[in-house]
Image (cartoon, rainbow, N blue to C red):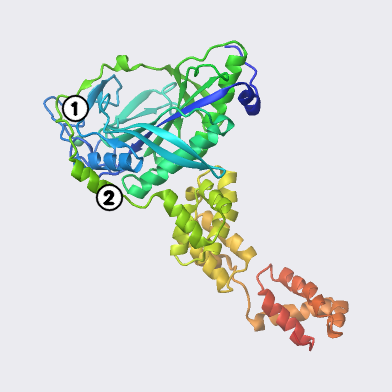
Amino acid sequence: MTTIALPSFSDALGRYEPVIGLETHVELGTRTKMFCGCPTTFGAEPNTQVCPVCLALPGALPVANRLGIEATIRIGLALNCSIATWCRMARKNYFYPDMPKNFQTSQYDEPLCTDGWVDVEIDGETVRIGIERVHLEEDTGKTLHVGGATGRIHGATESLVDYNRAGIPLVEIVTKPVPGIGARAPEVARAYVTELRDIIRSLGVSDVRMEQGSLRCDVNTSLNRPGEEWGTRTETKNVNSLRSVERAVRSEIIRQAGVLDSGGTITQETRHFHEDTGDTTSGRSKETATDYRYFPEPDLVPIAPDPAWVAELKAALPEKPSVRRARLREDWGIAELEMQAVVNAGAVDLIAETIAAGATPAGARKWWMGELARRANETGVELSAVGATPAQVAQLQALVDDGKLNDKLARTVLEGVVAGEGDPAAVMTARGLEVVSDTGALTAAVDEAIAANPDVAAKIRDGKVAAAGALVGAVMKTTRGQADAKTVRELILARLGVEG
Ligand SMILES: [Zn+2]
């Protein structure tokens, strides 16, 4: 393989226009699987949640889970789609060891929901993303490659298959191609997946956790020269976080520009995204629809949702996340740009829950957008996985408000919380970090500071009260920041016989 010189992102965008598209799989949170009654609990012992239907034993017949269909329709409605009045499931034929039937029950030319849209905000500007289709299908099992160092098939001595996931309902959401967004393509991709996740979470049909795989994203990217036809697209798989969605688009734009600059052509293929390097590497060449030999599933009756039922589902949709955000922005009394930062940090729900747990909007926002956001950034994790819960942040702020912690001590306590040492109150006690405001305990330190700084003490006695700051600082130092500054100041002035 020859190495190609890569242009910078902005150079690439100077010569080419990107078109992106996103295919997102959402694992529904139904209690049972899509075509049988097996439970769907995450993390169960391998192959304990299986039956003849999801293992595809001869003679077993599937029956559709009504709640899976209902959830798909609700997602479609929330994405402004039209809902089919009659459609069928289809068999998508291919062999894979973790797919016991050798076909996936999916939908092909008759998806349940079509032609919708989602609006996302980028720097105060609205970008509308078209939704091509929302269809229902089933998940595969999981293959585990063991004996090798990497967990990949290469170097493994054996492969084990767990069918617990086989047959769990999946909803696939496919966007229309999104052209004309230029350098904002990576941001738009991330904003779209964020919005989609928030919408689906608001419906309560999935826990949409990227790190657990209940929301999985494939990113299509192509480049073309201005005025020319769209280029050949690649499909990047394994994009397991919001941050990775953005990075995957960015690195694929740079890679493709490098190939095109050197006179090469882009191969239509799937590529794998690597979290560690931020690069993509070539996977398999992409199958086309004819490779799958789709045909209507003969073992399932067609799906024909009653329009009256669909209308009921539509009327019962929850408040849209975008509407909710506007309402929260108002409640929290912050500007549009600040709210945008909260959204980008993935902190909307965390802050809302912290306020619900008793914190003020300012107090909740301060911790999530300050110390915790910084930490999440540094360690490359989502804010929700940073190690502190809204209840803990609310408790931390309460300790500050009660004067038990000052800001500096609170940050140390938060470190302990994030490190898994327990709730803020427990960390404060265990580490002995509580602010000391007991005058008896502070008097000795105050006297010591006065004795050590006779010049300063003299100034204060002469009425230069402002000089007390230096003595407060000295006391804070000897008490390792744990003295209550206000009490210390009062004590100093009292000891020197000066009125505060
Ligand atoms: Zn089953």
Q: In this figure, which residue is indicated by the disc labeled 1?
A: 56
Q: Secondary structure at mark 1?
A: loop
Does residue 146 appear left or right of residue 447 in this picture?
left
Front residue (pair 250, 153): 250
Q: Position of residue 370 (x, y in %)?
A: 59, 55
User: Which residue occupies 53% across, 65% down?
Assistant: 396
- For badge 1, the amino acid type reads Ala
Q: Position of residue 381 (x, y in %)?
A: 52, 44
Tell me the number on the disc at residue 315.
2
Q: Specify the quadrant of the image occupied by residue 472.
A: bottom right
Does residue 367 appear left or right of residue 353 in this picture?
right
How many neighbours does mark 1 have within 10 angstroms: few (below 14), some (14-19), or many (20 or more)?
Answer: some
Tell me the number on the disc at residue 295.
none
Query: Where does ligand 1 appear, by image quarter?
Result: top left
Q: Is residue 437 visible?
A: yes
The quarter of the image holding the N terminus is top right
Is the residue under label 1 in contact with that under label 2 (CB below 8 Å)?
no
- For badge 2, the amino acid type reads Ala
User: Which residue occupies 18% across, 25% down?
Assistant: 297
**Measured along the vertical axis of the image, is residue 296 above or below residue 118?**
above
**Measured along the vertical axis of the image, is residue 101 above or below residue 374?**
above
How many numbered tags mark residues here? 2
**Measured along the vertical axis of the image, is residue 338 above or below residue 1?**
below
Front residue (pair 359, 179): 179
**Residue at far front of view:** 227
Q: Position of residue 30 (x, y in %)?
A: 26, 44
Front residue (pair 204, 331): 331
User: Which residue occupies 16% across, 30% down?
Assistant: 302
